[in-house]
Image (cartoon, rainbow, N blue to C red):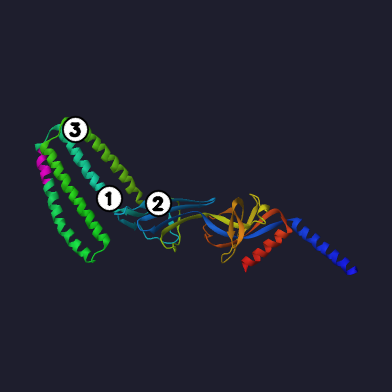
Amino acid sequence: MKNHFYLFIGVIGILILAALLLLIQKGNTIQAPCLLLPESEWILSHESPGEVYSRLICNSPPQVQEFKLLLAERSDLIDFSLVDKIERDKPVNKGAVIGFAISIENHFRVAELQTKLDLEESRLHVISTGEKSPIQEEYQKTYEYAVAESEAYNQIYERNQKLFAQNLISTEVWQTCELQKRLLDIKVSLAKARLLTVQSGLKTEEVNMVKNNIAHLIDQLSWLQKKIEAEKIQSPLDGHFADTAVPGVICKVVDYKTIVLHIPVSLSVVNNIDIGNDIQVEVLLKSPVQKHTKVVSIGSETQLIGNRGMILVTGRIDNQDLSIRPGSRAFVRIRCSRVRVMDRFRNSLSMIKIRL
C-alpha cells in the first residue's frame, strides 16, 4: 500500500514538472541556421531552342519577376552572342549591354518592309509631281540590277540545295540561304512594280490610298524596330557576375551590397519572435564574422524543410565592402522576450543536429 502511495506521488510529480516545462517562460534566444542571399539577382537563361528568359529576383521580400525576352517563330533562327567574356566578380552597371539575341526573321522583315515603303513613297512622288521620264531610266537600271543579283545568287542557292539534300551542310545554313533567296526575289518583284508604276502612272484619286499604305508600313516598321531593340539584352541592376554552373544559364548578376538573411524557424517557436527583435549573425568564413541586425519580416506560409514545418524569418545586413558572399554558411541567435522552457529545449536539440 505504501509503495502504491509513493508511486502515485511520483506520477503526480512528473506531471507537474511536465506542465512547468510547457508553461514556464524565460527570456532567451532562439538559434537557427541561416541562408545568406543577395538583395537582388538577375538570371539570363537559354532553356529551350528559340527561347531566352530573363528573371529578376528580389529576396527581400522574396519575389520573382519573370518575362520571356525572345520567342522565335517556327521558321526563325536565333543567333545569340555575348558582348564580352563573362568573368566571376566582374562589376556590371545597370543598363550595360550583355549580349544580343538576334532574330534573322525580324531583320529580314525590316528589309522587306523598308523596300515596300520606298516603293510607296516613289508612287506618291509620281502622283504628286507627274515626273515620269526623269526617273524612269533610274528605275529601269534598279530593276535590271535586282534581276542580275537574283540570277547570280540562284547558282549559290542551287548548289546549297544539293549539298543539303546530301546532308553536307547544316539546317541553319540552308535556312539562311532560303531567306536570302526570298529577299532577292522580293527585291526583283518590287523593283519591277516600281518600274511599271513610273511607266503607267497613277490617278490622282489614289493619293490617299498610297498615303494610307505608307502610314501602315511605317507603323509596322516601328513595331519591328522595337522588337529588334529588345534583342539587345541589358543588365537591369548594378552588381557583379556570379558563377553560372547551372545548365542553360547564360549569365547571372548579383547585387550583394546588402545581404538578405533567410532564417527557417520551427512552428513551435516562431510565435515568440516579433519584427524588430535583435539578431546576432555568425558568418562561418575562414575567420568567423559577427554581425548584428533586426528581424525585418516573418513569413505567413509554412514551408516543409527536413520533414519539419518551418516559417521563414528575414533580416538584412550591410555588406558594402562585399566581404560576405551570398551562399556562405551562417548561424543566427534571435533575441526574444519570452520562450517556453520546452521550446527552448527542442530548439537546442535541433541546433545540435544541424551542427552535427
Q: Nearer the viewer, residue 2 or 315?
A: 2
Name the amino acid type tagged 2.
Lys
| Residue 37 image position (x, y, % from top left) | 53, 57
Q: Which residues are magenta?
A: 134-141
At numbered mark 2, what does the secondary structure look like: helix, strand or loop?
Answer: strand
At numbered mark 3, what does the secondary structure look like: helix, strand or loop?
Answer: helix
Residue denoted by label 3: 206
Look at the picture and state if 201 lies above or below 30. above
Q: Is residue 291 visible?
A: no
Cα separation, mark 3 vs mark 2, equals 43 Å
Give the residue furthest to the right. 2
Position of 170 compared to 8: left or right?
left
Residue denoted by label 1: 107
If you read the primary sequence from the N terminus, does the residue marked by circle 1 or circle 2 appear first? 2
Residue plotted at (17% across, 38% down) = 122
Position of 28 compared to 252: left or right?
right
- Asked if labels 2 and 1 touch by Cβ distance under 8 angstroms, the answer is no
If you read the primary sequence from the N terminus, does the residue marked by circle 3 or circle 1 appear first? 1
Residue 68, numbered label: 2
Name the amino acid type tagged 1.
His
Choose mark 1 or mark 2, whichever is in front: 2
| Residue 254 image position (x, y, % from top left) | 47, 56
